[in-house]
Image (cartoon, rainbow, N blue to C red):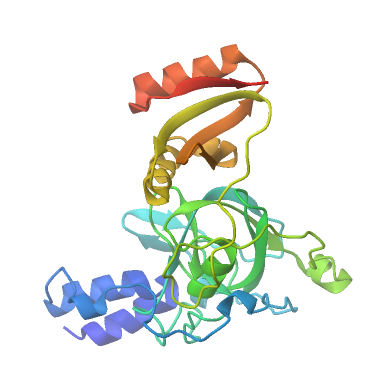
Amino acid sequence: MDWHRQWTQTAQHTGPALALALAALLSGCASRPPASGRDGPEANPPANLGQVPDAVPRLEPIRVGGPNKPYEVLGERYEPITVDAPYTDRGLASWYGKKFHGRPTASGEVYNMYAMTAAHPTLPIPSYARVRNPANGREVIVRVNDRGPFHKGRIIDLSYTAALRLDLLRGVAPVEVRRITYAEIRAGQWQSTTEPAPLFVPDGVPGAPQREGTPGASIGAGVWLQFGAFSRLDGAEALRQKVAEAELGLLPLLTIVREAGLHRLRAGPFPSVDEARTLADRLRSERGLDSSLIEKR
């Protein structure tokens, strides 16, 4: 079977991640790739990636067909948007790196993990979107030129540099995505006037600036649910991903705060103690997620 031709055709619709998986199956390769083929950052990325500017939105026609055709992946059918329409969503973001660097995207362009681009299941290709990390207020503008991700709860796959600038390199995390329309581009309304929070990245991340401060600000007064406390930040991040995947409605409420030397995953504030308790009981019975009630005055 001509698996290379199959992979090329698939890449035009689904992006490189799924296409590589199908290529491995069609060629009879082992299901687990060698260590050298695993995704992640390169050993020596360019310097000062935190200063890479946003993608600059411009008027580009939306192609009919090609990467904007309806398609099916893993039993799910996707209908890409083919008109200039507003779009907003909240969900989980992931990122992809060296495994796909230099390979074709769904648009036919070569994927550059150091450019400000992204993959999305249904946004028009090409189009531009503002992506915001609600945990720290940081925002970036990316050019959507690929398809994916195809995991439950995930709504966008960012380039390495876009994820770095949002402080999302530690793994999957909640974001807000809003498409920039033609009218906003014509009027120049896509330019942000907000001042982002200081960039915080884990130690040892290639291409990242030095650590500044601690992640997350102290929470204010109100009623909160705490899901766990960890000595290491990655423990809190892993739990945040688990809670977000189990209850997408909590995405904008989840935050990690540093108190008494621990990283604490909390959701809130809630309007009342009763509402917080009701949600806590439902999460415990339906999702197996335990939490404790905290009142800050």
Query: 28 left or right of 52?
Result: left
Residue 145 visible (yes or no): no
Instruction: Depth check: give the residue in front, 247 or 59.
Output: 247
Q: Where does residue 122 sit, x and y in percent of width and height?
A: 53, 61
Q: Is residue 67 above or below residue 199?
A: below
Residue visible at 29% across and 75% down? 20
Q: Where does residue 201 sit, x and y in percent of width and height?
A: 51, 63
Query: 206 left or right of 294?
Result: left
Q: Where does residue 178 sit, x and y in percent of width and height?
A: 67, 57
Query: 187 left or right of 127?
Result: right
Residue 54 quadrant? bottom right
Q: Is residue 67 above or below residue 256?
A: below
Residue visible at 15% across and 80% down? 27
Q: Farthest residue in the top direction?
A: 274
Q: Is residue 192 above or below residue 134?
A: below
Q: Where does residue 258 sit, x and y in percent of width and height?
A: 53, 42
The quarter in which the C terminus is drawn is: top right
The quarter in which the N terminus is drawn is: bottom left
Residue visible at 38% across and 24% down? 290
Residue visible at 59% across and 56% down? 213
